[in-house]
Amino acid sequence: MRKFENQVQLIKYEVLKEVSKLAFKGTIKEERHKIPKTIIPGPEPRSRCCIYKERAIIEDRVELAMGGNKENKNIIEVLDIACDACPINRFVVTEACRGCLAHRCSEACPVGAIRHVGHKAYIDNNKCVECGRCREACQYNAIADVMRPCREACPVGALSIDKDKKAVIDNEKCIQCGACVYQCPFGAIVDKSFIVEVIDLLNRAKEEDIHVYAAIAPAISSQFYYAKIGQVVNGLKKLGFYDVVEVALGADIVAQHEAEEFKETIEDKGVMTSSCCPAFVSHINKNYPMLKDKVSSSVSPMIAISRLIKNIDDNAKVVFIGPCIAKKMEIKEKDLYGTTDYVITFEELAAMLDGAEIDLEYLEEDSLDNASFYGRVFARSGGLTEAIRHVVGKEKYDIDFEPVICEGMKECEKALKIAKANKLKCNFIEGMACEGGCIGGPASLHHGPKDRGQVDKYGKEAMEKDVKDSIRIFNIDGIELEREIEKDL
Ligand code: SF4
């Protein structure tokens, strides 16, 4: 029995599943208009005011599930029609207001936005500057902060509200972390999907000499709780993937490379940051340009594994499958473009499998064993640090490795600020935009503390116990593992 975290995730899944179903059938263009009625059959609405609005929203969701607005380079879009239920003003006086004599709220307000009528305070929203001092001053907690969840979630202030009271994303500021997608309670902010293009590729691969590889992120070990990893691998092959490869092997390669880079450059750099989380790297590019030269020049595990696959197989196309939305943007970066062909998320994979009527629970288990323990635990925070520490120790590098592990943008921001001021007491920053690391990604099927344990269990099941053991099986000579940390889309 499939479980969903909430109705937003369920509706997203239903749309992706219907789109997948028609794409596999080859009739998506002709039959896409049927999807809104399939999902909202009526006569009763599911959660909004009427079925007509719900169907109109589904129509827009179908558009995004088919790639969305090509003019908008951002991978994340606001569904205007679905964005209409949040409070417009941030601070609201509630029923708890006692109409006291002290009027500490209006005394605290620096712009005179509060007046008292009868026995109640009122906020003039034309004057309010959202400083929150009134809220802090009220002894009855009678002033509520109802900041829009998307704005609250955005770590870089990329979200604002337009004159029609709709959320707007500033693409120049956005780092594609996906926090707004995950936090919007109405599902009004959505990541574009490329499942139709991936399904088209899989369909073409049946006729043409194309080998479509599924590169699965190690976070998958905590996701398909209703099936074993081996059954997911089998399911991917049934979908038409030529083979399934662990991105954790790319993580092993990156760990070895990054440890060597650390040894060679840390004296000059003073501090080095990880480079595998695209939202973290984007944040440095956009907001801490003075720290760009501290970012490791290693490509991400996704790019490393894609290059390895393409080095081995001339007919390869690579589809990365993971919990991350920012990866959809990473593959478009100028110096990486064409390396990984598509990115789909775990949410999208689950919908594709169900759209193709592949029931994982009843499949035989296929094998998957490309990576070491260390590559696999990259999926959770602290994993990358463990891997580098392991290489530093194993290779007996004569250096001090003093890491700080940052999970979530708040912790990243704190470490970067201190590094900018040259006051960081450590010499390595592991930066992951999502809490918990990749397993906390916005497009994970579920989130929670158990996921970390699942990743560790998966790590311990690896046949290869050492980073070098897994790398030495493959010839990685000649694979470019360095890149310029400069975004130019
Ligand atoms: Fe802000 Fe992240 Fe949403 Fe971009 S994706 S608008 S950075 S929360």
Image (tube, helix red, strand yellow):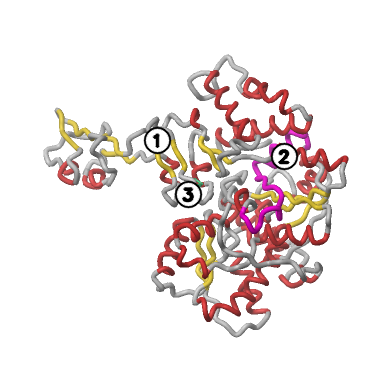
Mark number displayed over residue 162? 1
- Which residue is labeled 3 in the image? 172
Which residue type carries mark 3?
Glu
Residue nearer the viewer, 138 or 388: 388
Residue nearer the viewer, 80 or 96: 80
User: Where's residue 25, x and y in %?
Assistant: 79, 29
Which residue type carries mark 2?
Glu
User: Where's residue 114, x and y in %?
Assistant: 19, 37
Residue at coordinates 43% horizontally, 69% vertically from top-left? 419
Q: Can you tell which quarter of the image residue 63 is in?
A: top right
Q: How crowded is mark 3: few (under 14 residues within 10 Å), some or many (20 or more)?
A: few
- The residue carrying mark 3 has its beta carbon less than 8 Å from ligand 1: no
Residue at coordinates 77% horizontally, 71% vertically from top-left? 477
Q: In this view, does 289 lie above or below 321?
A: below
Residue at coordinates 49% horizontally, 43% vertically from top-left? 180
User: Where's residue 43, x and y in %?
Assistant: 58, 14
Q: Is mark 1 on a helix, strand or loop?
A: loop
Residue at coordinates 77% horizontally, 34% vertically from top-left? 356
Mark number displayed over residue 197? 2
Q: Give the range drawn in magenta.
A: 333-358
| Sequence-wise first label, 3 or 2 | 3
- The residue carrying mark 2 has its beta carbon less than 8 Å from ligand 1: no
Q: In this view, does 478 lie above or below 124?
A: below
Give the alpha-carbon distance from disc 3 to disc 2, as whole Å. Answer: 27 Å
Q: What element carries label 2?
A: helix
